[in-house]
Image (tube, rainbow, N blue to C red):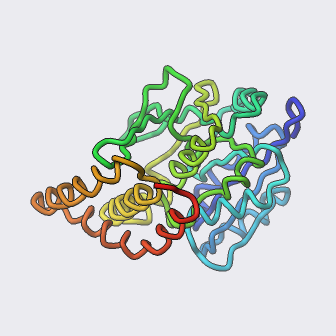
Amino acid sequence: MTTKNLTVTIVIPNWNGKALLERHLPGILEASDDAEIIVVDDASDDVSVQFLSENYPKIKIINKNKHEGYASTINLGVQHARADIVVLLNSDVEPEKGFLKPLLRHFSDPNVFAVGCMDKSIENGKTTLRGRGIASWINGFYIHKRGEVDKMDTAWVSGGSGAFRKRMWEQLHGMDPLFNPFYWEDIDLSYRAIEKNYRLVFEPKSIVTHYHEKGKILTTYKPKEVLQISYRNQFLFIWKHVKGIQIVKHLFWMPVRIFQSISRGEDAMVLGFVKAILFLPDIFRYRVKNISL
């Protein structure tokens, strides 16, 4: 597909998601405007690949031999994309017709790296509007949360429903597999893009529906496991990027927050911290290469 001379590839990650693909692929195809579509299978052991091969022969399927997680799966899909702009859609996301055009118009600015969609997230039977994030360093921790969707600036673009300029993606070396299996990889990528002075944009007219509770994370992992992984990756992100006075604040507040977690009988943060320590050699290598304190 070409829009204003920009070509588009849609990349969809899959892991044992036959039911999700069966439900959402028709809507994706209807909204794709004949864009190239790639599904990257993260070593599924269900019949997802067979389903795709039999029912969607025009979709390019990339098979992985080993299950690794989200960042590695997405990186492989982007690597094989032929287009200028790569649109990432999770398998539990369905876009509305016409969602591509509002995304693409922002790429007329050559400094724009990524544009995020308006995410109608279905949570506990209600719809929450997401897609714009706000974040800041507070007491040595990078605190991020949902932002109101009445502005177009954003702290990150979600890997579940966003468009990315492939050339800049390659310059940033894509998502960091350190964050496998999931969470924080898109925040990390966006943070590194901002440090390069690339622009991130939130586009409220590009609308997708996100069936969050039907996704593979919440239907495969126990809530406690999800929380541990989230805390682990929060620590990894902080240790990758913390600088200056925030280092001192983190060293002070980190044990305080861990003690508070223990005193409340909540061990997810503690376990996440312990698991993050195992990746310290990777963190040190990154910091030596990329950061001057």
Closest to the observer, 46 or 14: 14
Placement of 133 over or under 188, stated as above or below: above
In the displayed structure, does residue 59 sit left or right of residue 287? Answer: right
At horizontal 82% and vertical 44% (from top left) the residue drawn is: 84
In the displayed structure, does residue 18 sit left or right of residue 274? Answer: right
Please provide percent x and percent y for residue 15. 59, 66
Please provide percent x and percent y for residue 17. 59, 62
Placement of 279 over or under 143, stated as above or below: below
In the displayed structure, does residue 289 sit left or right of residue 86? Answer: left
Placement of 87 over or under 46, stated as above or below: above
Work out which quarter of the rendered image holds the C terminus and state it.
Answer: bottom left
Extreme residue in the left direction: 263
At horizontal 49% and vertical 20% (from top left) the residue drawn is: 150
At horizontal 40% and vertical 55% (from top left) the residue drawn is: 238
Query: In which quarter of the view is residue 148 placed?
Result: top left
Please provide percent x and percent y for residue 109. 75, 28
Please provide percent x and percent y for residue 192. 57, 48
Extreme residue in the bottom direction: 65
Closest to the observer, 179 or 207: 179
Closest to the observer, 239 or 42: 239
Placement of 78 over or under 148, stated as above or below: below
* Label total for image: 0
Work out which quarter of the rendered image holds the N terminus and state it.
Answer: top right
At horizontal 32% and vertical 66% (from top left) the residue drawn is: 272
Extreme residue in the top direction: 150
